[in-house]
DNA sequence: TTATCAACAACAATCGATTGCGCAAACCAT
DNA sequence: ATGGTTTGCGCAATCGATTGTTGTTGATAA
C-alpha cells in the first residue's frame, strides 16, 4: 500500500540501508547470499526506487522541456509524438510548454525551465521572437538545448530545421518541369518574421530565376493565419494578373487556400497548378491531387530529440545546423 | 552561473541555512532587518528553490500524468492544450504518456506513474482496454484519477465524458426535423469495444425509434480507422439500400467519408443529408456544409483537469459521472 | 536586582538513495 | 604461525529545503 523504501527493507533484514542499495545495484561488495535475499524481498514488497530522491542525489531533474508555439495544429502533434517516444525510452520525462505564439509566454516558459532545473530543452520559437535574450540564462548555465523548425538562423546554437530554401526550390522545379508552358507563378507565404518564411521565399525566388521566370508583380503574398490565406487567395485569383501556378508554403496556408478553392469552385489541380509544402494530412483528405514537399514533424522531432540525447550522454554542448530530408510526394 | 542554494546564501551572510529558509518563507521568527538583507541577497544572486528537493521533503512529485491512446489526431491535441493550461497555472508539471492504442503500453504507462510517484492521473483508455486491472495499484494507493472520454462505464471512479447517447439523439433529431421526407438513415460508428461507440449507437437507435423509423438492414456499420470508413462508405453507397441520411460518429470516420465522397463526386449536403459528431475542424475545411454536434476536446480536457485539481486540493477521492455540453453547430 | 517573556537564530533531524571510507573476519601464502 | 590480501558490510556524509527543539540574547516588569 504505502511506499516501500530502502530503509524498510534494511530494517526488515536487520542490515544497513547502504547494503540494500548496493545489492539492488548489483555492487560486488555485497555477498551473493545476502544479495539474493535482498533482491527477493524487495521484489516481494514491490519496492520502487523514489525517482525524486535519485534526481536530488544526482543533481538533476529528469525532465526534458519542449517549448512550442502551438499544440493543436498539423505539425506539432507529430513532433510531440516523436520526442515523447525517444525521451521515455531514455528515462526522461517530457514537459510540454505551450507558448501560444506569445513572446511573454515563451519567456515565462524559459523561466519555468530554470525553476524546475530541467536537464535539457527543445525549442521552437514563436512568431514574436526575434532574439534569444530570454534563453541566455539557460544557455549560460550550460543546459543542453536544441532549437528546431522555427529557429533563429544566426545564433550560435544547436539547430535542426527543414532545408526550406532547397525544398521550396525543388517544389517549384517540380511544378515547372511538369507544366512546361506556365509562366505566372504565385506564392503564398507565412509570417515574414519567421526564418522558415524567409528560407522558403528565397528558394522560391531562386527556382523561378533558374527557370528564366521573373516573379510578376503582386504574385507574392503573406498570410498569418489560414483565414488570411483564404482572403489572400481570393484576392489573388480575382486580380488581373491571375496566376497559372501556385506555391504554398505550409499546411496553415494550404488550409485557407483549399477553403477558398471550394468556395470559388476551382480545381487546384487543373485550373491552377499547385505545389505545397505539407506534412501530408491535408493533401490526403482534400478533393484535389496536390503534390507536396513533405515536411515531417515526426522526423524533425526525432532528429531534435536525438541531438539533445547526444548532448546529455556526452555531457557537452553541441552547436551547428542540422537538417531533415524533404521528399517530394505526388 | 551555477545554481545558488540556501546554503550559499547562509554562508555568505554567515548565518544558518534554516534562518535563510524561514526568512524566504516570511516566518515571524526572523528579524525584519536580517530578513530584508536575506531577501535582497537571494534576489541579487538569482536564487531559485530546488523543486526536486522540495518535492522530496513534501513526499510528492509535482507531476500530473496524462495517459492517452493517441496524440496526433483531431481530439487529443485540444485536450492537451486545455490540461496543460490548468496544470501549469497550478504549479504542476504535465507528463504526457502515449499508449498508441496498445493495452501493453497503457499498462507500462501506469507503471511509469507508480515509479515516478505522480500526484494525479488523467486517463483516456485505449481500444484494447476492457478492464482497469492495470490501474488497481494506483487506485489502491489512493492517487487521484480522472477517466475521460474513452472510459469504462461501470467502474466506480471519477469519469468525465461526452453525453454521447443524447448528443447522437440530438444530431439525428436535427437531421430528421430539417429533412422531413427522408427515411433511410445510415450510421457509421467506430470501434464497437469503446463505450463511446455504444453510447452513440444507442442514441442513434432511440432517435430513429422516436421518429417512427426502423433502422433498415445493412445501414449500421463499424469502422476502426478512417481508411476503413472510406471503404465502408463506398460499400454503403454502392449497395441496393442506398441511404438518404447519414450519421457519422466521429472525426476519424468523417475523414474517411469525406475522402470517399470526393472520389465518388458526391455531395454530403445535397445528395446525402449528413450529420456528424466532430470537434469542428473537418466540417470547417471540407467542401460540404456538414452540420455537427460539437464534441470539444478542449472542454473535456478542461473539465477533467478541474476535477483532478479539486481532488488534489481537497485531499479526497471523488467519484461519479460528469459531462460536458455538446451544442449543435450548423 | 531578579524574574519573565519576547525576539531571534542556531542545531539537528528528516525526506530516500548513494558512495567514499574504514573495519573486521576470513583467506592465502610463505 | 605470521604477515598480507581479499571479501563483505556498516558508518556517516551528501544532495537542498524544511521544521521542531533548543539556546542565547535583550528588554520589560515586579
Image (cartoon, coloured by chain):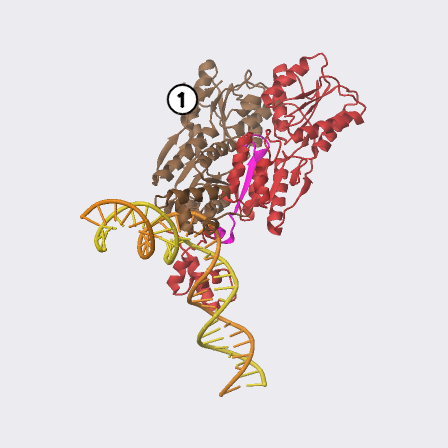
Chain colours: A red, B brown, C yellow, D orange
Q: Residue at x 39, y 20 (%)?
A: B210
Q: Can residue A330 be seen in the rendering of this structure? A: no
The number of numbered badges drawn on the structure is 1
Q: Percent x, y for residue A180?
A: 79, 23
Q: Percent x, y for residue B292?
A: 49, 22
Q: Residues within 10 Å of mark 1 (few under 14, many from 20)?
A: few
Quadrant for residue A242, please give it: top right
Q: Kindly identify which residue carries mark 1.
A: B209
| Stretch in magenta | A54-77
SS state under label 1: helix
Q: Percent x, y for residue A131?
A: 62, 33
Q: Nearer the viewer, residue D12 or A188?
A: D12
Q: Can residue B225 be seen in the rendering of this structure? A: yes
Q: Residue at x 66, y 43 (%)?
A: A319
Query: Does B277 lie within the magenta span?
Result: no
Quadrant for residue A181, please give it: top right
Q: Chain of mark 1?
A: B
Query: Does A63 lie within the magenta span?
Result: yes
Q: Nearer the viewer, residue A206 or A78?
A: A206
Q: Percent x, y for residue A140?
A: 59, 44
Q: Nearer the viewer, residue A19 or C15?
A: C15
Q: Nearer the viewer, residue D1 or B199?
A: D1
Image side of residue A289 versus residue B319, left or right:
right
Quadrant for residue A188, please give it: top right
Image side of residue A130 versus residue B184, left or right:
right
Amino acid at each position: 500500500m504505502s511506499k516501500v523504501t530502502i530503509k524498510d527493507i534494511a530494517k526488515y533484514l536487520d542490515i544497513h540501508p547502504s547494503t540494500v542499495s548496493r545489492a539492488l545495484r548489483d555492487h560486488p561488495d555485497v555477498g551473493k547470499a545476502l544479495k539474493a535475499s535482498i533482491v527477493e524481498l524487495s521484489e516481494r514488497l514491490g519496492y520502487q526506487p523514489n525517482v525524486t530522491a535519485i534526481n536530488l542525489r544526482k543533481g538533476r531533474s529528469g525532465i526534458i522541456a519542449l517549448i512550442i508555439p502551438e499544440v493543436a495544429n498539423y505539425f506539432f502533434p507529430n513532433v510531440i509524438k516523436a520526442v515523447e517516444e525517444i525521451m521515455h525510452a531514455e528515462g526522461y520525462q517530457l514537459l510540454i510548454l505551450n507558448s501560444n505564439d506569445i513572446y511573454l509566454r515563451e519567456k515565462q516558459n524559459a523561466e519555468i525551465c530554470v525553476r524546475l532545473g530541467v536537464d535539457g530543452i527543445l525549442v521552437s520559437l514563436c512568431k514574436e521572437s526575434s532574439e534569444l535574450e530570454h534563453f541566455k540564462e539557460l544557455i549560460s548555465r550550460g543546459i543542453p538545448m536544441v532549437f528546431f523548425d522555427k529557429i533563429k538562423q544566426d545564433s550560435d546554437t544547436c539547430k535542426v530545421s527543414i532545408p526550406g530554401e532547397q525544398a521550396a526550390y525543388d517544389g517549384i522545379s517540380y511544378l515547372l518541369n511538369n507544366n512546361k508552358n506556365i509562366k505566372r507563378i504565385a506564392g503564398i507565404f507565412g509570417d515574414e518574421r519567421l526564418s522558415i518564411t524567409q528560407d522558403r521565399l528565397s528558394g522560391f525566388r531562386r527556382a523561378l530565376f533558374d527557370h528564366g521566370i521573373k516573379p510578376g508583380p503582386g504574385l507574392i503574398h503573406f498570410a498569418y493565419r489560414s483565414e488570411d490565406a483564404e482572403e489572400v487567395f481570393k484576392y489573388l485569383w480575382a486580380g488581373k494578373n491571375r496566376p497559372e501556378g501556385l506555391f504554398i508554403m505550409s499546411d496553415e496556408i494550404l488550409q485557407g487556400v483549399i477553403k477558398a478553392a471550394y468556395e470559388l469552385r476551382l480545381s487546384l489541380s487543373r485550373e491552377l497548378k499547385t505545389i505545397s509544402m505539407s506534412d501530408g494530412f491535408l493533401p490526403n483528405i482534400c478533393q484535389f491531387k496536390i503534390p507536396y514537399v513533405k515536411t515531417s514533424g515526426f522526423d524533425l522531432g526525432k532528429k531534435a530529440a536525438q541531438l539533445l540525447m547526444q548532448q546529455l550522454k556526452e555531457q557537452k554542448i553541441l552547436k551547428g545546423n542540422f537538417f531533415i530530408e524533404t521528399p517530394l510526394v505526388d
